[in-house]
Every structure is written in C-alpha cells, then in structure tokens.
Image (cartoon, helix red, strand yellow):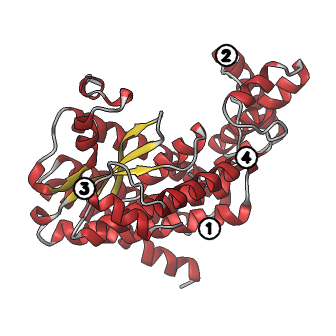
C-alpha cells in the first residue's frame, strides 16, 4: 500500500460515495464522465509503460496511452466506483506506521528464528472492524498481512470481523497489543483514505462500542476480548 | 565515499541479513503459519532495503523508478500470497494447537451462529 496507489485513485472523487451509492452514480454518468472516470487508470498504466521502457519521450507516452486504452477496452475492465479520499498527512502517518511496524516486527521474528524457534507461539484473535467500506476493509487486510507477525486468516464480511493470526505471542499482554495494533491500523487507513461518510460511520461505530461497554453488555465475547475492549476506548 | 555510498553500505548487508534470517525462520519454525510469517515478511523488508541500496548506486534516476515499481508490486502481492496460504492452511487443519495461545476463529465456528462461518465454507478446498 503506497502513496502512488492512493494518488491514482484520488482524482476520481467527484461522486464519492461508498458501496451501492457509488455504483448508482456510476450508472447515471454521461459517456464523457465515464471516460473521465477511466482516465486515472489509463494514466497509471501509461506511467508504468513509460517506467518499464525507461524513456519518457513523447513517443513512448503516446504509445503507452494507446496500449493502455486498447488493453482497457479489450479487457472490458469495469469502472470501479472508488469511494476514496486522499489525505496526504494521514497517508504519511500511515506509511510511517507500516514501515516502522514492518521493520520492528521483522526484527522480532528474526530474533525468534535464531533463538529457540520451537517456543514461538501464535494466536488467532477476533477483531471487530468499525468501518464498512469494502475497499477500506481490503486495504486494512492487505496492510495487516504485509506487517510481519500479523496475518489475516478470515474475514467475516457480514459482521465486519477480522480473524488475525499474530505471532510471536508471549503473554496476555501481547494478545492485547495485537488487537490494539489491528485497530490502530484500521483507524489509520480510514483516516488516510476514507471519505467523510466513512469517517463519520467509523466514529458512530466507535461511540456505539463505547456505549455498549458502558452498559456492560459485552455479549458472548471471550474473556480476553472483554478485557481488551475495556482497555481500548480508541 | 559519498552519502549514497554510506546508505548502500548500510542497507545492502542489512537487507541480506533479513533475507537470511527469514530463510532460517522458514526452516526452523515448527508451524506452517510461523513459516509463512518468516518466509514472506522479513523478505519484503530485505528486498526493499536491497533496492534502496541499489538505487543509491545508480547513475540514472530513471532506473530507480523501475526499482520502486518492483518494491510496489512486492508490497501488493505478498499480502495476497500470505493470506492465501494462511487461509488454506487453516481450513486444512494445518495448525498445531500446542503452538497456539488461543483460537477465536475456532470458537466462532463452534458457536456456529454466523451464517457466513459454517465450517463447510471454511473446509472447502480453496
């Protein structure tokens, strides 16, 4: 997940709405708008073409745009209703966080690889997600699996729950840390790429969670989860 | 020795070290999921470090863009690979209980109160 990717999508935000609303808007577009909507993808494909040729001359650019357009038309790629925003500051924060996490946890796993690997324990935790946007969930899942020591095993889309395998786990504390890390990654992704509506929903979910905890109605959650939810008002 | 040389002198051996340790982990970790962690993620860090080191020695910035593209696609594909292996490993029961502190996915499956999570769905060969 890098800034390039987000930048490419960011152009397309006129009718930003998540899920079904975005698709509706897509159907009502005029041909010109539809062409404009495909432009970012064409631009990205052309950029890759130019990079691969290693030669930014006008001829290469034109040829690249031609190939990209032809490829797009031949593959009949759909226009994705991309409901994403791009907040440079938060993206920087997110990239910094992921780079740091990748590095730190790689060191951690490396230590375990060299020193008593047979003692390394893992855990699969259930982490409820607060966002309901498909794209954001996909990004969070990818981001988590990129970081060493966390790996998304299963995603319950209906209820928005991630099942994350984490390692190395030494104690209850590292289980709590894993949960907190997952939720922090989610928050960073929502703030970096979510639309205003996504953020609003995220915060609504957060308030609802806080209320549920206040009422003490932590239904059927295992002990560890309850303890964690109380500690994790974020 | 320029600043670029210093960066290369640090990142290249460090990258090689990460790649090496990742491979050691691949051999030494007892569980499949542990091996997936060791095989995919330290290698990504290693590759990025090595690419950064290599980019500092290039005479031309345009070639560095090519290296950046390699890093980008590594970062986009590794999660997919790791997740696919992880999911298949789990659904095939390739997880050893003794190396797990807890498994809330198994608990959720046992509760069986989630339509999406009937064991049958997980057991499907992916």
- Above-or-below relation of A119 to B2: above
The numbered mark, 4 or 2, whose residue comes first in the sequence reads 2
Question: Of helix, strand and loop, which one carries label 3?
Answer: strand
Residue A191 seen by the camera:
yes
Which residue is tagged 4? A197
Tell us which disc is closer to us: 4 or 2.
Answer: 4
The numbered mark, 1 or 2, whose residue comes first in the sequence reads 2
Q: Work out which quarter of the rendered image holds the C terminus of chain A and state it.
A: bottom right
Viewer-nearest residue: B57 or A147: A147
* Percent x, y of residue A49: 67, 37
The Cα atoms of the two marked residues, 1 and 2, are separated by 36 Å
- Above-or-below relation of A160 to A89: above
Which residue is tagged 1? A93
Tell us which disc is closer to us: 4 or 1.
Answer: 4
- Above-or-below relation of B122 to B6: above
Which residue is tagged 2? A76
The Cα atoms of the two marked residues, 3 and 1, are separated by 28 Å
> Do the dots labelled 1 and 2 sit on one chain?
yes
The Cα atoms of the two marked residues, 4 and 2, are separated by 30 Å
Viewer-nearest residue: B78 or A122: A122
Question: Of helix, strand and loop, which one carries label 4?
Answer: helix
Tell us which disc is closer to us: 2 or 3.
Answer: 3
The numbered mark, 4 or 3, whose residue comes first in the sequence reads 3
The Cα atoms of the two marked residues, 4 and 3, are separated by 34 Å
Tell us which disc is closer to us: 1 or 2.
Answer: 1
Q: Residue at x 29, y 61 (%)?
A: A224
* Mark 1 closeness class: few <14, some 14–19, many ≥20 residues within 10 Å: some
Q: Is residue B20 left or right of residue B12?
A: left
> Do the dots labelled 2 and 3 sit on one chain?
yes
The numbered mark, 4 or 1, whose residue comes first in the sequence reads 1
Tag of residue B54: none
């Amino acid at each position: 997940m890098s800034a390039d990717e987000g930048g490419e999508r960011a152009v397309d935000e006129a009718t930003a709405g998540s899920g079904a609303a975005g698709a509706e808007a897509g159907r009502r577009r005029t041909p010109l708008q539809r062409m404009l909507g495909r432009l970012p993808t064409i631009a990205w494909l052309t950029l890759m073409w130019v990079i691969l040729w290693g030669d930014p001359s006008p001829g290469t650019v034109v040829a690249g745009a031609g190939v990209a357009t032809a490829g797009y038309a031949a593959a009949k790629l759909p226009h994705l209703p991309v409901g994403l925003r791009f907040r440079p500051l938060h993206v920087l924060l997110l990239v910094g966080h992921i780079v740091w996490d990748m590095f730190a946890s790689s060191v951690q796993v490396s230590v375990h690889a060299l020193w008593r690997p047979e003692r390394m324990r893992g855990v699969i935790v259930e982490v409820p997600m607060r966002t309901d946007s498909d794209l954001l969930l996909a990004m969070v899942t990818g981001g988590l699996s990129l970081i060493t020591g966390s790996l998304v095993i299963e995603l319950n889309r209906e209820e928005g729950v991630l099942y994350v395998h984490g390692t190395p786990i030494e104690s209850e504390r590292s289980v709590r840390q894993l949960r907190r890390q997952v939720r922090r990654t989610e928050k960073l992704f929502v703030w970096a790429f979510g639309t205003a509506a996504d953020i609003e929903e995220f915060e609504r979910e957060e308030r609802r969670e806080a209320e549920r905890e206040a009422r003490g109605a932590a239904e059927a959650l295992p002990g560890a989860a309850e303890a964690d939810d109380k500690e994790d008002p974020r | 020795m320029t600043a670029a040389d210093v960066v290369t002198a640090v990142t290249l051996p460090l990258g090689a070290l990460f790649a090496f340790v990742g491979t050691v982990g691949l051999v030494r970790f007892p569980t499949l999921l542990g091996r997936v962690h060791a095989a995919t993620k330290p290698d990504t860090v290693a590759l990025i470090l090595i690419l950064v080191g290599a980019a500092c020695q290039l005479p031309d910035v345009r070639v560095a863009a090519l290296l950046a593209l390699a890093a980008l696609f590594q970062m986009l594909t590794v999660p997919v690979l790791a997740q696919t292996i992880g999911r298949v490993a789990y659904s095939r029961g390739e997880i050893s209980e003794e190396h797990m502190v807890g498994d809330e996915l198994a608990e959720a499956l046992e509760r069986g109160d989630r339509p999406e999570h009937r064991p049958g769905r997980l057991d499907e060969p992916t």
